[in-house]
Amino acid sequence: MFPETRMRRLRYGNLLRDFLSETRINEEKMVMPVFIDENIRKRKPIESMPGIFRQGTGDYLSYIQGLADMGVKSILLFGIPSSKDSSGTSAFQSNGVIQRAIKDVKASTEITIIADLCLCEYTDTGQCGLMKGHYVDNDSTLVAYRKIARTYAEAGTDIVAPSGMMDGQVAAIRDELEKSGFSNTLIMGYSAKYASGLYGPFREAADSAPQVGDRRSYQMDYRNSREALRELKLDMEEGADILMVKPALFYLDVLREARLSFTLPMAAYSVSGEYTMIRNAVDQGFLSKDVIAESISSIFRAGADIVISYFTEYILSGGLEEQ
Ligand code: PBG
Ligand code: ZN
């Protein structure tokens, strides 16, 4: 009977459901984060993130080639350096862990490289910026970010992704890239990045936990969403090529609004804590594996063009299809 049964008719059978689905997990738009630890030769598991490893200097290249072979189109690189100091010197050396990795990966695969640009893995304080007394000093931090951006671009990265939430970071980096002849290097801004408890596992993974204090003076208050639109607008005006909302799952409202308010490519970062919650619940049998696809689909449905997820490798390697 028309129209009473139409809604059910539209859901009848798998083929029809697939044909009519509005969004899908776009595997080509998924980014895999990769941790490279200069202190180890062989990969080591990250305890709080089952299935995720810190790659060693001896095996990261074959790991990344493997990702490329399974169809991963893009990686987000994080480095764990062999030395840390108060100025984060190891972040902007031309033979630094990430600079070397960028060169090696570029020389051997076609994968798109996004290099996370921050100081928290490289400073002995674990803060994303340089300290002046008890405070993170915005403007001297920008000078360091410029140096990092330049060395990443020289190494050949496709995209730099400043994640420290300093004011003016995108403008400073864009300026530095132009001046040094890298006008084709893209900037993905971590534009709306919240001070979230969901970064916990990452800080173990990247050895980047703040030694004193927290990050609430530069990351956003999770009670706010209009503030996110202001941050996104600033990054756009400062010259970002791609905008980002982070985390993803607890912030789908922000992502949706960001998508509707801006026309630049919009990325969403489903962070370490999101991965850990789902991975552990699935591994223990408390949730069905379907929630992995459900959660990633929700991020695309909310409007993300690009999704950064620790499930990328699992999905591209066919994990969702296995029984
Ligand atoms: C560092 C950085 C963080 C993440 C990405 N870059 C952590 C933080 O700000 O504390 C989080 C990623 C994750 O949790 O997966 N600037
Ligand atoms: Zn940082």
Image (tube, grey):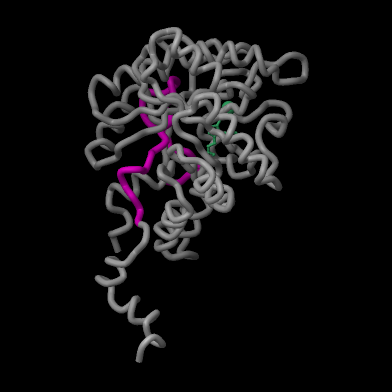
Furthest-right residue in this view: 134
For ligand 2, the image quadrant comes to top right
Q: Is residue 270 left or right of residue 198?
A: left
Question: Can you see residue 53?
Answer: yes
Q: Is residue 110 left or right of residue 127?
A: left
Choose top left, top right, bottom left or bottom right for residue 313.
Answer: top left
At a point 45% along the width and 20% down the height, the residue shown is: 39
Choose top left, top right, bottom left or bottom right for residue 323.
Answer: bottom left
At a point 43% along the width and 30% down the height, the residue shown is: 35
Q: Is residue 47 magenta?
A: yes
Residue 85: x %, y % from top left: 60, 12
Give the extent of the magenta segment: 24-50
At a point 38% along the width and 31% down the height, the residue shown is: 43
Residue 240: x %, y % from top left: 49, 28
Name above or below for residue 251 compared with residue 106. below
At a point 71% along the width and 47% down the height, the residue shown is: 223
Quadrant where the image shows the N terminus: bottom left
Count of labels shown? 0
Question: Can you see residue 207?
Answer: no
Choose top left, top right, bottom left or bottom right for residue 197.
Answer: top right
Q: Is residue 315 left or right of residue 116?
A: left
Name above or below for residue 279 compared with residue 246. below
Residue 215: x %, y % from top left: 68, 31
Residue 69: x %, y % from top left: 22, 38
Name above or below for residue 61 compared with residue 311. above
Furthest-bottom residue in this view: 1
Q: Is residue 114 magenta?
A: no
Q: Is residue 192 left or right of residue 8?
A: right
Name above or below for residue 123 compared with residue 252. above
